[in-house]
Amino acid sequence: MELTALSIAEVQARLRSKEITPLEVLESLETRIAQVDPSIHGYLSRDIDAARALARTADVSLPLGGVPIAIKDVINVKGEPCTCASKILQGFRSPYDATVIQKLKSAGAIPFGRTNMDEFAMGSSTENSGVITTSNPWDLTRIPGGSSGGSAAVVAADEAFAALGSDTGGSIRQPAALCGCVGLKPTYGRVSRFGLVAFASSLDQIGPFGKTVRDTALILNAIAGHDPMDSTSLASEVPDYTAALGADLKGIRLGMPREYFIEGIDPQIDRAVRAAITHYESLGAEIIEVSLPNTEYAVGVYYIIATAEASANLARFDGVRYGHRADNVTGLLDHYGRTREEGFGPEVKRRIILGTYVLSSGYYDAYYLRAQKVRTLIRNDFNSAFESVDAIICPTSPEPAWKIGDRNDDPLRMYLADIFTIATNLAGICGISVPCGFATVDGRQLPVGLQLLGKPMDEANLLKIAHAYEQSTDWHKVRPQF
Amino acid sequence: MSSDFDVRYTAQLARLNLSDDEIARFQEQLAQVLDYVEKLKKVDVSGVEPTAHTYPTFNIFRPDESRDWFDPKQALVNAPRQANDLFIVTKVVE
């Protein structure tokens, strides 16, 4: 087996037995990237020399000692570009490390490579990248999902052992499902957002992609915890998220929300997810039907709240302190208007306009305030469901990866692709996507993701439930051929 | 309500220049999105508190102490225009 195909846990075993060195691990990854990334386009940049320097001194006894981890280009790593795949941040170099990067480095990991994404994390296909379109490793003519499409694709293509992404409405779980890897969105506040370029501050959360559930647990161990630099980060203690992995599922109750098994789901996805549910029963879990009655409002609520927060967050791109600045401006309004026109791509502009509108005088109550209230009802739905179940089980995406270019100019249709992931962020709970089979489309095998949603701060249980399924099936072992 | 939606005016509020083509396209696309969110009006939200933070936390304080952060050189490292350790801004007052 190629070194790059190993999980973090497997690489660590070899590092600790001194069978291989961190530098060899890094070089094998670099070779793999040079070989496959010209077809995948998952990376925007990488600094092999900086990574080599860290690899030479890596302490393999640390929890992630000597393990390279790819970073979505929305998280600041000191001295590296952080472009958010936007022209407006071309040439930007981070003057500091995000808290998650400091924590990864303290755990011995080597941040290596900046992954492609939808510009400012706005999108579900990575086609909104202002730089390049990433391909799905299972079919290079298809999208990898988004917005963390680069992170998902490089993990699936064995050109990263694991990666960090960010999830505002499904941007970790949906690409993980479409690329056939594991993606975890932690509870809002579990992981510090300091150093994550803000899209929608009440929804954004950083999380890991891995080849296995255990690998995502190892990374969560390293990045979770309170941070004085992020006042929304939660003070609760960080347990060892690997401790419960392997425990049996006797007595576990899984809720099947009837609103998530609806017409319009791809029939092959419906079948794969229902088969996974039957499999859980055979593992000792009890399946209970639950209702999340306000589900149909989630996409609408999300596109009001997320765009409103984005329009405020992106006001900072004014061409003064960093980023692109228009030439030969005639005055202040011309400076702002042209700097932003030249720097932002179409989807970002669209969302700034929508967000500005729903916050504007006379419309705030009708749109933004009402959406915040419906958001409360959506949270209440989950709270009620969690009174009778330990986790919720459903599909991650209603459809497998679609063709590049298929829905480029139909934003509403693109927004509806997030229908099963969005409510998680509105409720602030945690969620994970794990591979649960394949859909055959045009003769190609495309991965299907199973989504499990957990109570706030209950990642340990969620990971245990996901791990039990993964380890008793073989879906995660099937690798794409391209 | 969405019939009042005016992309040209909203773009001015957002300090974002748009081409005529973008204005026409966004007008049509976002009108569709606004029609879609009309369904929220069906929901009875009387007596419902808005959610600002999903995991309610209040009054986050930290000690009011100075700590190391950027020096002027570091703060200016990405500035498009600078002089004398300061950002150069476009003239605000004529």
Image (cartoon, coloured by chain):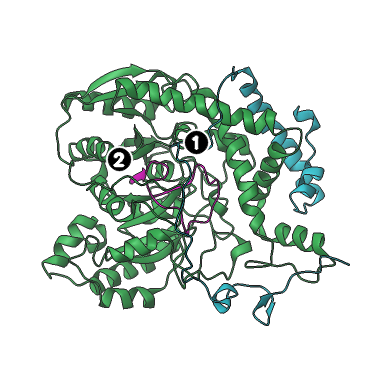
Tell me what residue is drawn at x 69 percent, y 75 percent: B81
For label 1, the crowd category at 10 Å Cα-Cα, with few meaning under 14, some 14 to 19 and many 20 or more, is: many
- The quarter of the displayed image where residue A56 is located: bottom left
Image-based side of A214 in relation to A78, left or right: left
**Residue A193 in the image: x percent, y percent?**
45, 53
**The residue under label 2 is which amino acid type?**
Glu
Same subunit: marks 1 and 2: yes
Among all residues in the image, which is located at the extreme right? B94
The quadrant of the picture occupied by the C terminus of chain A is bottom left
**Residue B46 in the image: x percent, y percent?**
60, 18
Residue at numbered disc 2:
A459
- Residue nearest the viewer, comparing A235 with B73: A235
Q: Is residue A404 above or below residue A472?
A: below
Q: Is residue A354 magenta?
A: no
The kind of secondary structure the magenta stretch mainly shows is loop
Residue A452's disc is none
- The quarter of the displayed image where residue A104 is located: bottom left
Residue at numbered disc 1:
A418
**The residue under label 1 is which amino acid type?**
Asp
Between the C-alphas of marks 1 and 2, the distance is 22 Å
The secondary element bearing badge 1 is classed as helix
- Residue nearest the viewer, comparing A72 with A134: A72
- Which numbered disc flags the more N-terminal residue, 1 or 2? 1
The quadrant of the picture occupied by the N terminus of chain A is bottom left
Q: Which residues are magenta?
A: A182-206
Quick one: which chain is cyan? B
Quick one: which chain is green? A
Q: Is residue A203 magenta?
A: yes
Tell me what residue is drawn at x 81 percent, y 65 percent: B92
On the question of residue A329 being in view, the answer is yes
The subunit letter for the residue under badge 1 reads: A
The subunit letter for the residue under badge 2 reads: A
